[in-house]
Amino acid sequence: MELLPRLQTKPALAPRRRFRYIAADREMAVARVKMIKPEEADAETRKVYDGVVEQWGRISNFSQVLAHQPAALAGWMLPNESIRLNNVKTDPDYVKIQQLVIIKTSALNQSAYCMSHNVPLGKKLGLTEAQIKAAQGSDYMSSPDLDERQKAAIRWADVVTQMQARDDDAAFAAMKDHFSEKQIVELTVFCGMWNYSNRLCEALHVDLERPDKRIEFQQK
């Protein structure tokens, strides 16, 4: 069974629950709320699920939990489409940076669920094991595996997640050196989105899928 990447972060203040893969189709997930299966969804939710499948090829456990409020799931999809998916072919290097922001945020929050999807997505785009490991750690600024643009984005995700960005003018100046104002907003949005999803998955015990059931970029 494939192992999750070890999160290179400072120790948590409290023990985290052990995540598990769903080992067989008959085994039930143990999220704290019921996951809304496609066959059980109402018309409004099925319409949103159609969009999820178009984006990712499958409906993740995260989506099946968030679907308790279809507007929340639909709202999650919009920036994913316009910021990430629409740039996969036209600007893959920028999407790699988005993945590094997601990975850094999720590593800081010790979100095994979000890491389980986004590390493989990053690798599909061409991120190396060394880059992913560096992004998770605390010494990423000295890493020879990351370029200056990548370091600026990871640093920004770090200070935004730790609520230090307001007073960190140097981190923001580095962002201005490497990104447009639109991109700065987009990367900050993604950092915020994954702080949200990390917390939702932890709080509601969203279970890990098997590796062959993870979301994937779709050919468009």
Image: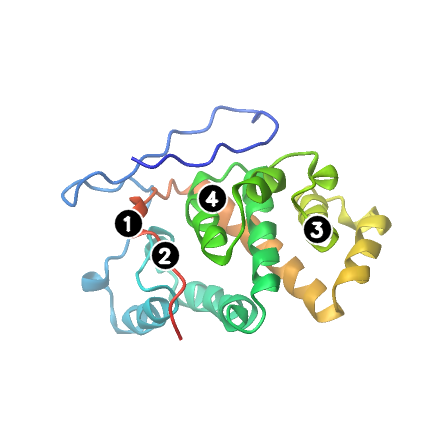
Q: Which mark is residue 215?
A: 2
Instruction: Report the residue marked by disc 4.
Output: 115
Disc 2/disc 4 C-alpha distance (Å): 12 Å
Q: Which mark is residue 212?
A: 1
User: Relative to 207, is 118 on the left or the right?
Assistant: right
Query: Please, what is the three-letter code of the amino acid marked with disc 4?
Result: Met
Density class for disc 1 (Cα within 10 Å; few <14, some 14-19, many ≥20) is few
User: Relative to 189, is 22 on the left or the right?
Assistant: left
Q: Quadrant of residue 177?
A: bottom right
Tell me the residue at 36%/67% (across/down): 52
**Of callouts 2 and 4, the N-terminal one:** 4
Q: Quadrant of residue 13?
A: top right
Disc 1/disc 2 C-alpha distance (Å): 9 Å
Q: Position of residue 219 (x, y in %)?
A: 38, 71
Above or below, 182 against 108 in this view is below
Above or below, 182 against 150 in this view is below
Whether label 1 touches label 2, CB < 8 Å: no
Tell me the residue at 64%/65% (across/down): 186
Mark 4 element type: helix
Instruction: Report the residue marked by disc 3.
Output: 147
Tell me the residue at 46%/28% (across/down): 16
Query: Please, what is the three-letter code of the amino acid marked with disc 3?
Result: Asp
Q: Position of residue 172 (x, y in %)?
A: 80, 55
Query: Please, what is the three-letter code of the amino acid marked with disc 2?
Result: Ile
Q: Which mark is residue 19?
A: none
Density class for disc 3 (Cα within 10 Å; few <14, some 14-19, many ≥20) is few
**Of callouts 1 and 4, the N-terminal one:** 4
Disc 1/disc 4 C-alpha distance (Å): 15 Å
Mark 3 element type: loop
